[in-house]
Image: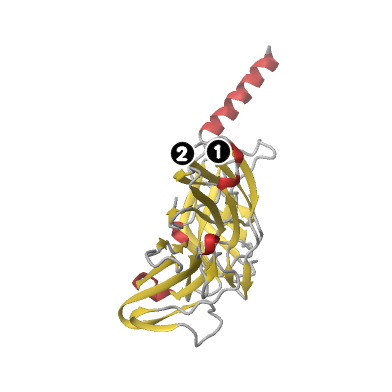
Amino acid sequence: MRFKLIAAVLALAASSAFAQFPQPTIDTIQPAEGTARGGTLVTITGAGFESCPPYLVGCTTATVVIGGRVAEVVEVTGSRVVVRTPSNSSGTYDVVVTTRGGTARRVNAFTYGSRAFVRLLLPTFIEGEAPGAHDSRWRTELTGFLRGSGSARVTDDPDAPSSGVVGAGTFVPLVGTARPGQGRFIYVTTEAAELLTLNLRARDLSSPDNLGVEIPVIRSAATFGPDSVIAILNVPIAAQYRQKLRIYDFDGELGRTVRVNIDGVVTRDIVLSAAAESGDFPEYPGYAELDLNLIPELIGRDAVTVTIDTPAEGRFWAYVSVTNNDTQQVTVVTP
């Protein structure tokens, strides 16, 4: 009887402890920047970090993710976590602390490398022209507008100090690519980022009536992940169309895997290509694509919903291009 009573008391104490884990909060992050190669010791202060009672052997306390990548935890107390940063590309990232009590996030709280540039993704970019199906000829047209009276750098190569300088008004960014039709990163000086408007349009030159389709230029704030779901709704799937799902890893040096679900009928685990880097500045995102019209389980459907489960690390974006087989007109379906 005494043994049962002790066991009941311990079980009650354990369940009570689990029910009372505090919600973590973040007050400060010092230092707020480090090298792109990683290894910087960062101290995060706040509350609710040590959420494991001392009698629970093997209980995990805080985990820290910086820019979609898990940091090495060096020390944890209730009000402080010390971590060693993982490597990452240059840029400014969120810091996320997770305990059994919940998650605390500080947006744009840690910068790798230079603070001078903001990274933007051109999901589709063609330098010159590229052939398409049914004798179509495609070109992307990128234009920009800088408000105010100053100047900025808008460049595909931040390491080239004299490239991409533009003044106020309308301009055409100079961008080259070795991967026609796939994603390409460009960079803009941070102080001008909020003054900049970019328009990216894909156009079929073989059709004089084709005015093109606009493709969004993606900033880091528009990406998804880690551990989130990208939902692309109402994608036309009838036989008169071609549909291609395009997936991008904004931090894709590693070549990560995402899970694609289509209407609960089809599931695919897709490995994205690794990004290509130039110094601290990636030139291309991780990338993968999937032709939906080649999936037999979808034959006969009018429209589908595509969801993409992102992994525990990384930031992602995706869209579906839908091409009319008769007119070659493209519709972009975004999250």
Q: From the top left corner, tell me how far across and down residue 335 is, in percent.
A: 44, 50
Q: From the top left corner, tell me how far across and down residue 55 is, in percent.
A: 66, 36
**Quadrant assignment for the N terminus:** top right
- Which circle marks residue 302 in the picture? 2
Mark 1 secondary-structure assignment: loop
- Residue at 41% x, 78% y is 172
- Which circle marks residue 175 in the picture? none
Q: From the top left corner, tell me how far across and down residue 56 is, in percent.
A: 66, 36
Q: Residues within 10 Å of mark 1 (few under 14, many from 20)?
A: few
Q: How many marks?
A: 2
Q: Foreground: 208 or 194?
A: 208
Q: Amino acid at mark 1?
A: Ile
In the picture shown, does residue 240 fall above or below 155? above
- Residue at 55% x, 55% y is 247
> Farthest residue in the top direction?
1
Is the C-beta separation of discs 1 and 2 under 8 Å?
Answer: no
> Farthest residue in the bottom direction?
162
Mark 2 secondary-structure assignment: loop
Q: Is residue 273 left or right of residue 301?
A: right
Q: Amino acid at mark 2?
A: Asp
Q: From the top left corner, tell me how far across and down residue 155 is, in percent.
A: 49, 78
Quadrant position of residue 34: bottom right
Q: Is residue 88 left or right of residue 79?
A: right
In the picture shown, does residue 114 fall above or below 301? below
Q: Residue at label 1?
A: 299
In the picture shown, does residue 20 fall above or below 310? above
Q: Foreground: 151 or 125?
A: 125
Report the Cα–Cα distance between label 1 and label 2.
9 Å
Q: How is the image coloured?
A: secondary structure
In the picture shown, does residue 18 fall above or below 102? above
- Residue at 46% x, 45% y is 235
